[in-house]
Image: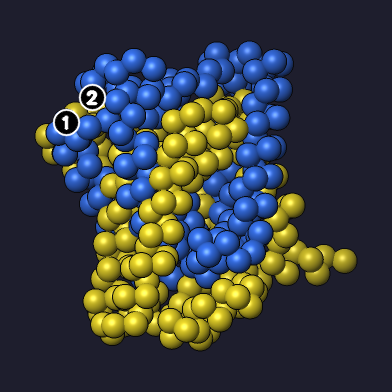
Chain colours: A blue, B yellow
Amino acid sequence: MSSTGTAALPAPSETGASPVGLRTGLFYLLAGAWFGVVLTKAEVISWFRIQEMFRFQAPHMYLIIASAIGVAAISLALVRRFVPRSVTGEAIHVPAKQWGKGVRYPLGGTIFGAGWALTGACPGPLFALVGSGLTVVTVVILSALIGTWSYGHLRPRLPH
Amino acid sequence: MTDWLFEPWPWWIAGPAIGLTVPLLLVVGNRMLGISGNLRATCAAVAPGKADFFRFDWKRVAGWNLLFALGIGIGGLLAVTFLGGGGEVAVSDATRADLAALGITSAEGLAPAEVFSWSGLLSVRGLVMLVLGGFLVGFGASYAGGCTSGHAIMGLADLQLPSLVAVIGFFAGGLAVTHFVLPLLFGGAP
């Protein structure tokens, strides 16, 4: 957990190596569709549910998140134990996140959380909301892209 | 007996279904669940500008993420079209009362129509919640290196301390906005 400065930080998602082919592409599309159906049917994409969560007034969101973490944790242990390579032939590897100066996680997280409570949606639900017919949410996605773009350009000057 | 399909799905279906996408993505393509990567990939594809952050092989690294996000949109469409999704949300009475005190009386649909509509967008409240809110989601997720899926699900399942700190940040920001900003937005200005 040593501080190595901004330049040495690994980019967030530079783990997968093999390019996306037709069959794997179709798989990611279908996996996303399933994910979107679940988010919508369980009301995870609802602004009302997110308000309920931030007001600690029902266990719904907490049970979803906790059971998702539990299932993911057990699966992850099993994958590490029994599945050395992915179907695409890569060695399965989950890299540890770099702590750096320890600023990006609390500060970036707090900024993200403020946006989450305002919009009632994190990035996944944003896409499901547009699909569900709330077309005005395209504005939120566009703003999120501008936010990402701004971060990308300010990155060298921000503490991480 | 497929009636349950059309009712809201309970947490014990949704949580495990979300959790299982983690091994699914890993086993098939060695990909870590995380959705905000598609925002970075889109910037890289459309307008990288001078930022090193956007100078990477986005097709190879995050092409999957763009397809996954597109799929999520399709999933939202399928859920409301064929599975009865998007109806009235049965939030708790306490939440209903809190929101009514702010002036939000309907839980019809997935979000309050007075804000989440094209007419609602063009007000101080609409601009703050949708435009500024979206900006903070994108900026914060990129700064923190992940969003709810990448940190709260994937990161916590992998027992990563940075993810725990990020998730605590998510709640710090969310609680502050819920208790100090929303009352201003709904109580004062239109």
Q: Give me the disc on residue A76.
A: none
Judge if badges 2 and 1 mark residues of a common chain: yes
The residue positioned 34% from the left and 82% from the top of the image is B187
Give the residue number, with chain letter if any, for mark 2. Answer: A6
Residue B163 placement (x, y as % from top left): 47, 34
Helix, strand or loop at label 1? It is helix
Question: Looking at the picture, does residue A97 appear above or below residue B150?
Answer: above
Q: Give me the disc on residue A156.
A: 1
Q: Amino acid at mark 1?
A: Pro
On what subunit does the disc labeled 2 rest? A
Disc 2, disc 1: CB below 8 Å?
A: yes
In this rendering, position of residue B155 left or right of residue A158 = right
Distance from disc 2 to disc 1, alpha carbons, whole Å, reads: 7 Å
Question: Looking at the picture, does residue B8 appear above or below residue B142?
Answer: below
Displayed quadrant of residue B133: bottom left
Displayed quadrant of residue A81: top right
In this rendering, position of residue B13 left or right of residue B31 = right
Residue A59 placement (x, y as % from top left): 66, 59
- Residue A28 appears in the picture as rendered: no
The residue positioned 33% from the left and 42% from the top of the image is A108
